[in-house]
Image (spheres, helix red, strand yellow):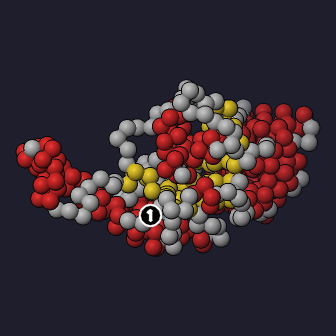
Amino acid sequence: MVAGHQHPLSSRLRTKRVLICVGAGGVGKTTTSAALALGLAMRGQKVAVVTIDPAKRLASALGLTELSGEPRRIHGDGTVKIHGELWAMMLDAKRTFDEIIERLAPDEGQRAEILANPVYGELSTAVAGSHELSAIAKLYELHEEHDFDVIVLDTPPSRNALDFLEAPGRLLGFLEGRALQVFLAPGGLTARLFGRGTALVFSIFARVTGVDMLGDLSTFFRTMSGVLDGFGERTRGVQELLRDPHTAFLIITSPELEPAREASYLADRLRSAGMSSGELIFNRVHGDGLAGRDVQDVTGLLTAKLGADLAGRVARNLADFDVLVQRDSATVARLSRELGQSRPVLVPALDEDIQDLLGLARISEYLLA
């Protein structure tokens, strides 16, 4: 098995300011993000950990009933001492978009008009379902407007994480595209964009329902024109941040077949997008097996202390675990070789679930020590 602790991850991350944890679902990515942030804070850094995981598992791992849309400080207890600062937050996508409008709108009147527009309400709620755009907006805000030493970002499962990586480019393409300019152009919008027949349908719809859909749409884009430059600037800033030398991607996986495939796929996409493939972290690695011996040898070694019957049962149990040990060893070696990672980090399979700071601190030692 490839040794992961000869070159501490802490030393390799010393110059990093943004750590983006990506990987398949169900591999402990949220727990890893929280443990990594806690470990860095225990070593004296001021760290923010952000999750867009709707299951809110990060909150319970940190001993909180909930996380809000603003960073909340986590204090140590009698068993875990935080020498720096640890802050945690859960993304509230709708609130994040409202805050962007509040920050970028040129005056209070335009700000209120945008927030009250029914088109904005629908769009911001729809986008809130995917979280990717709000994630990049919050990442930009935390990086530019706060004094954190490190920001740790937990992301959705890997296929969705690719949406997160590509969201800045898609948003910038929309903001600078011709379709948006049609909406922003004064006068003649209805006739040029939809034609007279469609415009008549919209007008009838407005009389029957009381909802001026096309008017709301046109008004929305015109009122948004004052904040689009700010959106574009932030989006370009995020694109640069994702490729910054001080940003690192951490690919989280487990030794199981499907998560390992996802990790390989994600590493390829990171490289094709011009981003660092980052560090490779294996969670739930099995290490207790026969240690190269056969069942008879282990039975003989244990017989003097356990008796022949119990020694045989223990040896056979170890043989069952040895199947997982061999599988994990082969997967770690193969994936590390494919990804060009000579120093993967290995976190062992633990008997208990991680539910508090002490458990997270234990994981952080495997990650950083």
Inspect this view and state whether residue 111 appears: yes
Look at 46% across and 69% down and name the residue there. 336
Count of labels in the image:
1
- Front-most of residues 25 and 219: 25
The residue at which mark 1 appears reads as 3
Q: Is residue 228 left or right of residue 15?
A: right
- Name the one closer to the observer, 38 or 87: 38
Is 155 situated above or below 257? above
Residue 83, position as x, y percentages in the image: 67, 37
Quadrant holding the N terminus: bottom left
Q: Which element carries disc 1, helix, strand or loop?
A: loop
> Which residue lies at the image location 85% right of the left edge and 48% below the top edge?
227
Residue type indicated by callout 1: Ala
- The residue furthest front is 304
Question: Residue 163 appears at what percent x and percent y?
Answer: 59, 57
Q: Is 63 drawn above or below residue 335 in the view shown?
A: above
In this rendering, would 37 be left or right of 201?
A: left
Q: Residue at x 45, y 73 (%)?
A: 337
Residue 92 visible in the snapshot: no
**Where residue 332 sits in the image (x, y, percent)?**
40, 64
